[in-house]
Image: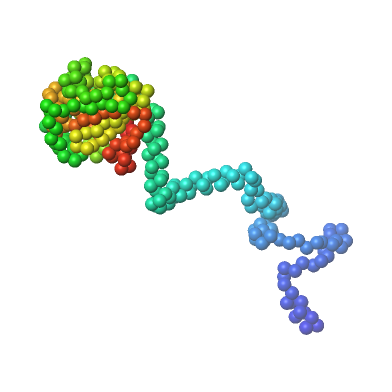
Amino acid sequence: MMGLQAGRGMEPESVKPENVKSDTGESKARDPEVVDPELADPKIIGGEGSEPRAAEAKAEAKASQSKPAHAPMTERRFSQVTRRELLKVAPVLALGAFAIPRLRDSLLRKGLGFSDWASEKLFRRGHLAPVFADAELTPFEKFPINGYDVDDPGVIFENWTLTVGGAVEKAGEYRLEQIQALPRVRQNTRHVCVEGWDVIGRFGGARLSDFLNLIGADTSARFLTVACADDYYESLDMATALHPQTLLCYEMYDQPLTRKHGAPLRLNIPTKVGYKQAKYLTEMKVTHVLDKVGYWEDQGYSSFYGL
């Protein structure tokens, strides 16, 4: 007997009998229930109001088991995720492309070409650059001298002419007096250098459009090119050449142009950056095709560079 009792005493207290009696005294079979470990807390199962709380917890557990962990990946959702991920990595890929010299040079040329194309399309011939009052002028002695090769290529003024050719009716050589005979325009405009500085100067001369009319230029041609006494060269699109503020400049601050500022004749184009405004002009050509764009442009700078 003692052995039997000892055996019984070793049974776990949590084991439930298979049959229990109901209030009527009849034996009633009871299926064992698996209790969720989270619900096994005596405070939940055995406490006051335990049945409603246990039922609620079981319902929540069942709902969480039936709910999928992630929404199904449809084709549309997959494409949206893919686009977002590509947008995230696009800057990194572009930066990586610029790190490869062969790709970098090509990308820079294409980007610059697109920028010039867009700038030319947006250029408005009738839209004027800002003009300024005399009080806002940079003093003449503080106007920077920015040369290409030498400050003075040694032009002999008495022998100077501007040689004109290309798509014009009156090709030939034109003296400064012929250009000065055209209506004179004086304007206070800003000169902007690609190096980062800018000044407001006073410029005087003939409209380039008036000179093109004088020589019978074909203004349906796309370009105008100039060559200079210091071997500099430059080109303009025809819309810029015809702009009313583009001057064949022979004056600064109401005085004859000085040698260091490009005498006897230079371009003044307030709608363009400084390197487009060639000095010491000696030749001009109207053309449909460019063999060379400009000294700096042929080294990778913008060919349009409007302001």
Residue 27 position by quadrant: bottom right
Q: Residue at x 71, y 61 (%)?
A: 35
In the image, 241: left or right of 140? Answer: right
Whether residue 44 can be seen here: yes
Find residue 70 and report its horizontal and vertical position in percent: 63, 50
In the foreground, 51 or 260: 260
Find residue 36 and report its horizontal and vertical position in percent: 69, 60
Whether residue 245 can be seen here: no
In the foreground, 263 or 144: 263
In the image, 57: left or right of 298? Answer: right
Quarter of the image with the N terminus is: bottom right
Q: Residue at x 28, y 34 (%)?
A: 234
Q: Compared to 173, does 108 lie above or below?
A: below
Quarter of the image with the C terminus is: top left
In the foreground, 40 or 148: 148
Find residue 221 and report its horizontal and vertical position in percent: 36, 25
Q: Compared to 138, does 10 lie above or below?
A: below
Q: Residue at x 84, y 58 (%)?
A: 23
